[in-house]
Image (tube, coloured by chain):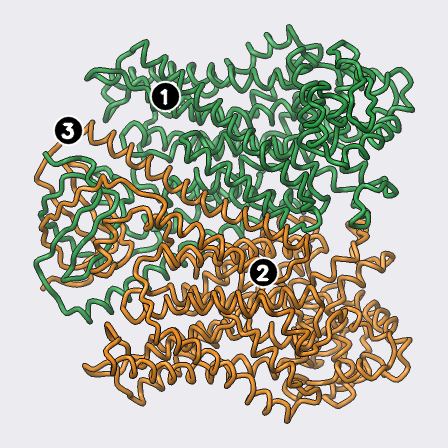
Chain colours: A orange, B green
Amino acid sequence: HTPLLLKLQTLVVLLSEDSAMENIVTEKKAEESHRQDSADLLIFILLLTLTILTIWLFKHRRFRFLHETGLAMIYGLLVGVVLRYGIHVPRDINNVTLSCHVNSSPATLLVNVSGKFYEYTLKGEISANEVSDVQDNEMLRKVTFDPEVFFNILLPPIIFHAGYSLKRRHFFRNMGSILAFAFVGTVVSCFIIGLLMYGCVMLMKQIGQLGGDFFFTDCLFFGAIVSATDPVTVLAIFNELQVDFDLYALLFGESVLNDAVAVVLSSSIVAYQPEGDNSHTFEAMAVLKSFGIFLGVFSGSFALGVATVSLTCPHVTKFTKLRDFQLLETALFFLMSWSTFLLAEACGFTGVVAVLFCGITQAHYTYNNLSPESQDRTKQLFELLNFLAENFIFSYMGLTLFTFQNHVFNPIFIVGAFLSVFLGRAANIYPLSFLLNLGRRNKISSNFQHMMMFAGLRGAMTFALSIRDTATYARQMMFSTTLLVVFFTVWICGGGTTQMLSCQHIRVGVDSDQDNSVSIGPDGIERRSTKQESAWLFRLWYNFDHNYLKPILTHSGPPLTATLPACCGPLARCLTSPQAYENEGQLKDDDSDLILNDGNISLTYGDITVSTDATGTRTSGQPVGGINSDEALDRELTFGDHELVIRGTRLVLPMDDSEPPLPRDPRHHREL
Amino acid sequence: HTPLLLKLQTLVVLLSEDSAMENIVTEKKAEESHRQDSADLLIFILLLTLTILTIWLFKHRRFRFLHETGLAMIYGLLVGVVLRYGIHVPRDINNVTLSCHVNSSPATLLVNVSGKFYEYTLKGEISANEVSDVQDNEMLRKVTFDPEVFFNILLPPIIFHAGYSLKRRHFFRNMGSILAFAFVGTVVSCFIIGLLMYGCVMLMKQIGQLGGDFFFTDCLFFGAIVSATDPVTVLAIFNELQVDFDLYALLFGESVLNDAVAVVLSSSIVAYQPEGDNSHTFEAMAVLKSFGIFLGVFSGSFALGVATVSLTCPHVTKFTKLRDFQLLETALFFLMSWSTFLLAEACGFTGVVAVLFCGITQAHYTYNNLSPESQDRTKQLFELLNFLAENFIFSYMGLTLFTFQNHVFNPIFIVGAFLSVFLGRAANIYPLSFLLNLGRRNKISSNFQHMMMFAGLRGAMTFALSIRDTATYARQMMFSTTLLVVFFTVWICGGGTTQMLSCQHIRVGVDSDQDNSVSIGPDGIERRSTKQESAWLFRLWYNFDHNYLKPILTHSGPPLTATLPACCGPLARCLTSPQAYENEGQLKDDDSDLILNDGNISLTYGDITVSTDATGTRTSGQPVGGINSDEALDRELTFGDHELVIRGTRLVLPMDDSEPPLPRDPRHHREL
């Protein structure tokens, strides 16, 4: 029994051949393989191009029944059919089985062919029944990507963009509900689906329909992966129709966060390994360990995403004056975000989760330090990357329905899955909404609940999780079923959004930006919607963020010298940029500008009486988390979202003396 | 003797092991390998980040002796030293040599380990003396990229950006000289260097310093790869100091095109294969065949790059009104450019060359159809990609000096290489300048010639070509020597640019945009510089482009109904967009605006009397390639470069009724 950690092996070859001839043949083969790869990639590029052109046609004709992702899937399906049945590859393959003593699977294999060494790298394990397929259809295998591509290349920009484009004001206002839906809801949904599927699997076993092992952990894993919602289709329509912003915030926030929860949940279910021989029994210790892994990985990724970004990026952008060189600034921003992902992966955390919180942090702190040009550039860059990655994943989804060679479609399992996905979503939304409504001032009305139920589409994350491992029978059945769930929800639920909206009488045409301006006047709707969820937890965080984090990390907020205790004076002076002092006055100006028309609201800094002298001695009162700070908090968030616009319209402000103020297109802030 | 075309082989394993245990170990290994990969990539990202921060410092302090690329190399060197000597990897490697009958090197290898199949893919051949290194230092091999990454991922954006950012007006005005330098000059330089190096190699053979084969074709190959100049450092300084634009155009145009020439030249030298056993003798037929390959591949790539783009992209952007959806437009633009690269590779042409001409064509035709926002977006996107790819290549270059394990440094070869590179460049610049000066109205002065001689840096393309194949002794020696040539030229020649400029009394601070405005008045310099190279070939092409291509492909130029013969009336009406008719009047307005102040120049359309009626009947005179069309041509090119600015400053023009005209930042057009 030779050691398993064996890394390299040399196979000594006994035959010898004409070396020059062999050389040329190898080169030709490599060239041909490269050409084939280019052609395969070209298929995908052309698919995306076709999708874009059709999307344009749809947008032009205001056709809303099919979203771009649904369309990408249809084109993918068509190409999949052509590849599967239309193209016949001549079999020039010689199958020779050679006997050899190998007793492990090293990562690198050196093969010695007549004195020349060839290096082989491990691509992965393939199941025994796949071997014949491998030999049969090289073509179909060629268009099959390494599943890790989705996780390491395509998902990060999508998730980052979700975090970066989060409308922070709406998100923070509904934070309590969003966290409840994302954490409690996803876990509830996962277990409900897992239990229902276990019943379904038991039934299949009884009537002899199950062709392989299917354990309870597999059922839970299935529950975790189909609990990740991705209402990109619905949100696109919401955006277009300008649906009520609270509904939008709830749906968007929930879907962004539950992706992260689902990833970590599924990995901790996989990590469930009880001691002893029978690895599929219940064991309290192992469950606790899995729970520990969930907490550890999630909080680790969260901390890493937030910490690396907030410790490096805002400081760098705050103090280097990189804003004079937009290209450098944009490049730095991109690299920093990517390195957060890589760092999390290298530390064994989940890169996708880290990148989500990295995106939110970047938007909250770094964004304000960027020059207006770079703010546009980064937004546009990630928008483009998100668009390309998303459409690529969805068209690949369509393609893989035909090119994947180990589909296991089981009618009972499929029906069970659809039913349990529906029930799992219901068990997530309705009870939680009821509980949340007990605490919310602005209730989640029943038509909102129905809409949230309906908008539980499954998308990129569910697909990436299910394709990651398709080695066993159970995983293959899950993958096939997941594909069908995604297709159904994207086409049917996505396509029916407009109908559902009008059927549920949800108001559309709400200008969410209009709603921001406090100067409109004290009408009932305004006040109600801006006050709803200023819970103590949130207020605590807000005060800390506003008084300490924002001043340390950005140019905005009150100067640190005013908020830190007197003993920290020197440190505070060192961390406060000269711009912050300048900004202080301006901030007040900006705020009072907004507030002047609104008689019944006290001053923004009403809860903190700030007065700074040159030595940085603090003469202000303590920040009080009183009820009247709600309004200041609200206005601050409003102001945060609108900073861009305000900076744009006030051309006379000496914000940056190195470049002339840039008149901005008023359409810009909608994309924020 | 089994067939060589064997593609898949199955190695049957005789030992069996505990499957569950094995499974876990394999998973652990895969996870560890993934973590290691993330950490390695993180090193490069942090290297780039560090480079950016230092560049910012340099730019801030206006320090011009070290360009960002030179800096990236220095950081790469440092990290290379640390990786090589600083980190000791514990040897947990078990070397077991197993005997096996394998008689070819298939692309895919299936290894059967106790019932489980593992798939291995061919990574490449490694030389016999490398085998021990592979086993010794896994760490160094980990940070070594597949050389094809440079060609297929990093070079395309760099080359595309070069083509896209080409200042077309200056380029077309000096087109004759640029083509001469790029084609004749590169071939001359390649052969001079090849012959000198052959002498050097003969000398080394005499004194017994040569440790392997080194044929004449190898020398020629070396000549081809070090003939690709990359004056990115010099041009960055030129841009900053605003050096004479003709010198800039000559250098930039030459370096962009000679990259393309060098790629094709090197591949046709590799393709030189005389009949018979001794494959390194002279044979006329094989030389002719190589020459044919050069012509075929170059013109094929050129045609493909120009054709696919000009046949698809401008039409799509012209007729679909995609400009209403900037994201779609940008995505489409990006995908189209990428698909040109892939198509060329799939057809067996050179993708890099195709992508260069694709870039030029996109800039000339598609760019005008894009909305102003997308023009910015695409420019910024490719600027960023170019920046990241370039700095990555240069830092990798520094790194690889220490991490590459088969360096062959031979003092005689290195001295010979430096000498021949110098002489090759001299044999390119001085004789050609003399010959060109016979025909040029605006002579290339001797200080310009010295500057061009001095600015012959070697960069990314030389590196990518030399790292592509390092299998033989000759290629390894070339690679090591090339690295030194790149280091020397980038640091010494790049760093000395400012000194060289002042030493040669070349005028700086010329505002190339200022020079464009014809309205300045008829002073001597203006007239001389705008007239220099309107040769008959160029004039012919210009007329064709202006009268047929531009109207077909873009919204600008005279309507096709006016320029096409009457028989093509229906076709012309179908291809002319409504905007072109609108634009016609505006174009004249714009032109006459510019011309009014300049009394002694005839109307722009002086050589074509255009008058169109609704039915599209042509009543105009023939376009005459007379002498007075020089000025129209000049002005057209000027106008082409300034379209953006003109569109920006004339806010009242109804250019696009779908969106409000956007006040533009005056700094924008400098980046054009």
Give the answer, above or below, for where A648 lies relative to A537: above
Q: What is the spatial separation of the Cα atoms under label 2 and label 3, in whole angstroms? A: 58 Å
Cβ atoms at labels 2 and 3 below 8 Å apart: no
CB under 8 Å between discs 1 and 3: no
In-front residue for pair A620/B621:
B621
Residue A261: x %, y % from top left: 48, 76
When the figure is inspected, residue B453 is found, relative to residue A552, above or below; the finding is above
Q: What element carries label 2?
A: loop
Q: What element carries label 1?
A: helix
For residue A167, side relative to residue A145 (left or right): right
The amino acid pointed to by label 1 is Ile
Foreground: disc 2 or disc 3: 2
Q: SS at mark 3?
A: loop
Q: Which amino acid does label 3 sit on?
A: Asp
Using the rendered image of the protein, determine whether residue B140 is visible from the camera's viewpoint. no
Residue A67: mark in rendering: 2
Question: Would you say the residues marked 1 and 2 are in contact, meaning their CB atoms lie under 8 Å apart?
Answer: no
Q: Where is residue A55 in the image (x, y as percent from the top left)?
A: 60, 53
Instruction: Quickly name the residue at label 1.
Output: B269
Residue drawn at x 78%, y 50% as measured from the top left: B659
Q: Tell me what residue is drawn at x 38 percent, y 63 percent.
A: A467
Q: Which chain does the numbered disc 1 sit on? A: B
| Quadrant of the image containing the C terminus of chain A | bottom right
Q: Upstream in the sequence, badge 2 or badge 3?
A: 3
Q: In this view, does B381 lie to the left or right of B628?
A: left
- Numbered mark located on residue A18 in the image: 3
